[in-house]
Amino acid sequence: RRGSLLLSTSSSGPNSPTGFTAAEEDAGDSSFIVHSSGGAAEASKMASLLIVPDLIQSADVSNMFLLNERIVAAESCWFVAKILVDLKPKILTLTSSSFRATCEQLISQFQVIAGQLRSLIYRSVCPLLIRHNTMLPQITENCGWDSKKLRENTHDWVDKLVQIGKDIWEYLSESEQFAESSTMVREQAWMEVCQSFFDLVMEGYSKVRKVSLEGRSAMTMDVFALHEGLNSVHLCRPPRGKHHIDNFLRTAYMSEEDMMQWIQENWRAYSYKHILGLLVQTLSSSAASALLSAGGGGRRLKEAVAVIDGLYEIIESSSALASTGTHSSGGSSMNISSLLALAGQPRRGSVRLRDPDNSSSNSGSSSILSPSNPASVDSSSSLIGGGKLSQLFNKR
C-alpha cells in the first residue's frame, strides 16, 4: 500500500529533516517501487515529491531552521485556498452544470487540506526551534525527581527554554525578514512555539519513572517558572499550558480510586503515553505500593493499564459502543471493575497508534486556529479532528 511508505518511520534518525529513513530520502531507492502499488511511474513521482530540498537540508539554529521560508510556504498555500473560495461563484458559472458539484467539492477539499498543511508546517518546525531532542534528556535525567529534599530553585533547563523562547521572539519581531509580516503570523508562530515548550515538558515529566512528593513539587515550580518566563517575553497562552500540566501533576496526590476516576473523566485531554507515565509513577512507587491491597502494586498497575487500554481503544470503536448504548466517557458510577469489563483484552501493540490529541472531542487540544484565538481563521484548517496529516505528524 502506498500509505505504508508514509508510515514507515520507525527506523528514521532523530536528525532526519523529514522523519524518513536515509534510504527513503534517496530518490533512486527501490523501496519506493516496493511500497507502491501504482507501478514504476507512480513510484518515480512519489520519489521526486519526497526528495529533501537542499535548502531544507541546510536548516539549522543559525537560520532559525528556515522559519521564514516555511511560513511563506504555509501562508502561500492558504492564500491560494482563500482565493479559490472567493472565486468559487465565478468558477461555477463558467463550469458545465454536470461538473459543478465536483468542482465545488474539490474547492472545499482544497480548503481543508491547505489549512491542515498550513498548521502542520507551523507545528513541525517548532520542535526544531526549541531543540526538543536536546532539551528532553535534560528534563528526564539528572534532575533528582525522586529526591526527598525540597528544592528552593528551578532547574537549569527552565532558564534555557526561556532564553530559547526569547531568541525566537526577537527573531520574529526584529528580523528584517519579518519586518512587514502581519501580527497574525507572529502570534500564530509564537503560540505554536509556546505550545511546543509545554508539550516538551509534559513529555519529559511523563517519562520519569520515579517521582517523590518533593520532586513533584519541584515539577510544579518549574512549570510555573517556565510560564512566567515565556509570558515576560510575550503573552503566552497555549491551550495546553501551565494549567494542563498542573492538573496532571495534582492527580498523583489523589487516592488510587480518585485518580482512576479523574483519568476516566479527562483521558481525552492527554496522550496515552502521558496517562501511562502517570500510572507507572504512582502505582509502581514504594509509597503507593504500601497503600495498595495485598495483591501488590504490580497487579494493580496491570489492572489500571488495562483500563486505559480500553479507554483509548474506545476512540476507534465509539460507533460500535453507541449502537449498544454504552457511552465512552461514562459516568461517575463506572468504577475500575466496570471499566475493566469494558476494556476487555485489547492488544497493547495496537493501542500505541491511538492518540486522543486527534479526537475532535478533545477540548484540551492545541490549536492556534481555534475561534477563541485573536489570530483565528476557519476552524476547518485545524489539524485537530483526526485528519490523516495530523495523525502522521503526531506519530512522528
Image (cartoon, rainbow, N blue to C red):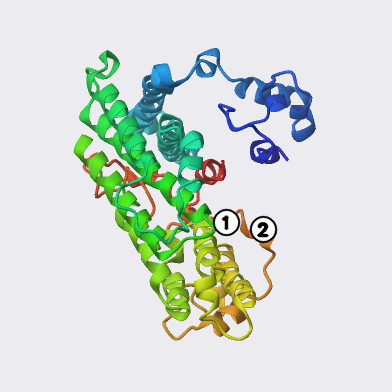
The residue nearer to you, when weighing 300 against 354, is: 300
Residue 354 is tagged as 1
The amino acid type of the residue labelled 2 equals: Ser
The amino acid type of the residue labelled 1 equals: Arg
Residue 6 in which image quadrant: top right
Of helix, strand and loop, which one carries label 2?
Answer: helix
The residue nearer to you, when weighing 5 against 99, is: 5
Position of residue 331 measured from the top left corner of the image (x, y, whole percent): 42, 81
Rate crowding at label 1 as few (under 14), some (14 to 19) or many (20 or more) other CA atoms within 10 Å.
Answer: some
Whether residue 237 is visible, yes or no, is no
Give the left or right position of residue 179, taking residue 97 as reference: left
**Image quarter in which the C terminus is found:** top right
Position of residue 199 measured from the top left corner of the image (x, y, whole percent): 42, 47
**Image quarter in which the N terminus is found:** top right
Position of residue 108 measured from the top left corner of the image (x, y, whole percent): 42, 40
Rate crowding at label 2 as few (under 14), some (14 to 19) or many (20 or more) other CA atoms within 10 Å.
Answer: few
109 over 183 or under it: above or below: below
384 over 131 or under it: above or below: below
Position of residue 195 measured from the top left corner of the image (x, y, whole percent): 36, 43
Give the left or right position of residue 65, taking residue 349 as reference: left
Whether residue 12 is visible, yes or no, is yes
Q: How many marks?
A: 2
171 over 382 or under it: above or below: above
Q: Are marks 2 and 1 in contact (CB under 8 Å)?
A: yes
The residue nearer to you, when weighing 257 against 112, is: 257
Of helix, strand and loop, which one carries label 1?
Answer: loop
Residue plotted at (35% across, 63% down): 247
Residue plotted at (51% across, 36% down): 133
Residue plotted at (50% across, 68% down): 282
Residue plotted at (37% across, 30% down): 78
Mark 2–mark 1 Cα distance, whole angstroms, equals 8 Å
Question: What residue is shown with label 2?
Answer: 350
